[in-house]
Image (cartoon, grey):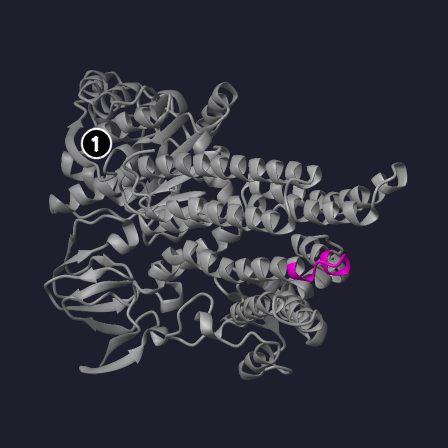
Amino acid sequence: MKEYRFRVTNLDCEHDAARLRRSLESEFDIEVLQILASSGSVRLSADEQKYSQEEVEAKLDDIGFPLQKQDEQLGPPPVWKNTKVVAAVFSGVLLLCGWLLSYLSADWLPLILYSSAILIGGYNFGREAIEHLLFEWRVGIELLMTSAAVSAFALGQPAEAAMLVFLYSISEALEGYAEAKTRSAVRALMDLTPKTALLLENGNEREVPVEELQSGDMFLVHPGQSIPTDGEILSGASSLNEAPVTGESVPVEKKVGDDVYAGSINGEGSLEITATKAFAENTISRIIEMVEEAQERKGESQRFIERFGNWYSPAVLLSGFAIALLPPLLYDTSWTHWAIRATIFIVAAAPCALVISIPATLVAALGTAARHGVLIKGGVYIERLAAIRVVALDKTGTLTLGKPTVTDCVVSDQAGIPPRTKVLAVTAGIERLSQHPLAKAIVGFVRNEDIQPLSVEDFRSLTGAGASASVDGTLMFVGKPQLFEDDLAIDLSSLADDITRLQDEGKTVAVVGNDQQAWAAIAMKDTVRENVAQAIEAFHDVGIAKAVMLTGDNERTARQVSQEAGVDGFYANLKPDDKVTKLRELLLEHQHVAMVGDGVNDAPALAEASVGIAMGAAGTDVALETADIALMADDLEKLVYALRLARRTQSIVRQNLILSVLVIFVLVIGAVSGSFTLPVAVLGHEISEFIVVANGLRMLRFQGTSE
């Protein structure tokens, strides 16, 4: 079986997705893996022996979902090519003609025009109503509207039935364009990468489609051009605008050996770059794919509304029957009169605005966040983020730059201790096999001292404590002072005063030695990020009650960093499992806690938190996969933006819900009391739908400067 992924046209809503799935599964031996209506994306699995890619594409074309052309705009077609719009407009023209002729001619001609308007305008949503009922056993809004139109026509109100069909069909047709507007941020992301790249082969340039770029290919980027895929600079230097990826508007200076991301805009210099990822796997492609999938992941409130709608719509239909039947049975009153009221009630109570109010807002918010360098993996995480009151932050790489430097190396004066040069050579030999930022700092320092690291064997990482390895047959250790004192029971008295002094200066101290004695103490210091204090202050402004730091460092270093960063508290000497335990304690106390880390070393803690947030995720696959929210830049103020966006989104969702419920309540009261006619109910229903969509679209313009 081979997996295919296509972008298709005419896939505008959940109804289209359901029809596509039914057609593929019933007519062809093709397994449907995923259909994303929001992006027109289809993922299929088919037997290569039965269907080639061209044959699968032909199957999609046959059932009305042809492939999207490379330069074709994502979203519904132009209005003059949209069959739903054309049908709705034609229905409106027939309605108008019938209404005018009703004053000039016999009854039969207007009746024919009204009937034609109903059949043409109601074909699409009527078909959807029947398909939902027959194939999914669901009573949807389309069935409510179809039933109301048929009832009105049967009760001798063809003009009112035609008006209902026209207004509902035109609103359904235009809804696709409104939904496309909410996804404009994804279209903007797609436009960030160029359509072609200048491939370098044997010194010659050749223009190729970006889709053909593979890892290892060399390509050229001229000033002013966008980077076609992720890569590493082989030749040249320039400033790159990485705003499309990270949301940071300040250009970043890049030189030979630096990584570059797809979608970044080259500044003043020409660059020769070797691709590190194929086009389909680069940062922008991953962001687009994740945003599209996030738009399909529904928030808890949206899922509740959908569950509510599953019983609410049938209840409306049954209530309509009750309104039509019970009064004439119980009282001496007209059947026709109450049947008309029942028809108006069905239209008035239809929950269109209620159903669309949440997804329209969430989809717009997700796309806007991605455009500003914040990747949120679903509406549920926007809801959770809006409820966060406590933020826990890892120290290294989050509050600090994550690039510590060695400041001191104090060798013990005990007998039998080798000279400083050998101490550093042994230490670097062990640490070069570790991925920890402190280990990299030591290795870099030793190399700068022109000292060659020694070869080691049997390297072993000691989680949360340090590392060990065999050097010339002797087992050596590098790690926290506690590793030597508690686990190895080694006396550190010869280094104790120096360790205390260095830790009081806010430095992290690593001890190196064997299982008999400690050789030396190596001190390192990481720099707190420039804007951390402002970000922590902004946390409080946005409603965060407490920001705490979780770190494996000693208490003195943690206190120093916490004071510089301005956090409300800290917890030091924490191993990875201790961070998880501490998070559980915070969750018990505060219920809603976010954890911010680098997405690699902090994976367990990120998973434990209400919302796991990875910082500096651009180009980092692990961070993108691990966290619920990924901040593409190394900037905590992006989290401030995300918090404001989440709170603003929830505010608009509440506004939409209140408005939707209020409109339904007023229309239902008016319908049952006989105060509203069918056209009034239809107009109120459709106007409320457009109002909530327009309100949700405000999130497309959200800049994060205020809530």
Which of 112/245 is in front? 112
Which residue is most to the front?
Answer: 104
Tell me the kind of residue under disc 1: Val
- Magenta stretch, residue numbers: 152-159
Whether residue 603 is visible, yes or no, is yes
Q: Residue at x 62, y 36 (%)?
A: 665
**Whole-percent x and y of residue 300?**
57, 39
User: x, y (%) of residue 561?
Assistant: 24, 25
Instruction: Measuring from the top left, give residue 69's x and y in whole percent.
Output: 43, 77
Q: Under tag 1, what secondary structure?
A: loop
* Magenta-colored stretch includes residue 156: yes
Above or below: residue 492 compared with residue 155: above
Quadrant (top left, top right, bottom left, bottom right) of the C terminus: top left
Name the residue beneath numbered marker 1: 528
Quadrant assignment, res 146: bottom right
Task: Residue at 44% x, 45% y: name it.
Answer: 696
**Image check: 307 left or right of 503?**
right
List x then y, in percent, for residue 218.
25, 73
Position of residue 24 relative to residue 642, above or below, is below
Quadrant of the rendering where the N terminus is positioned: bottom right
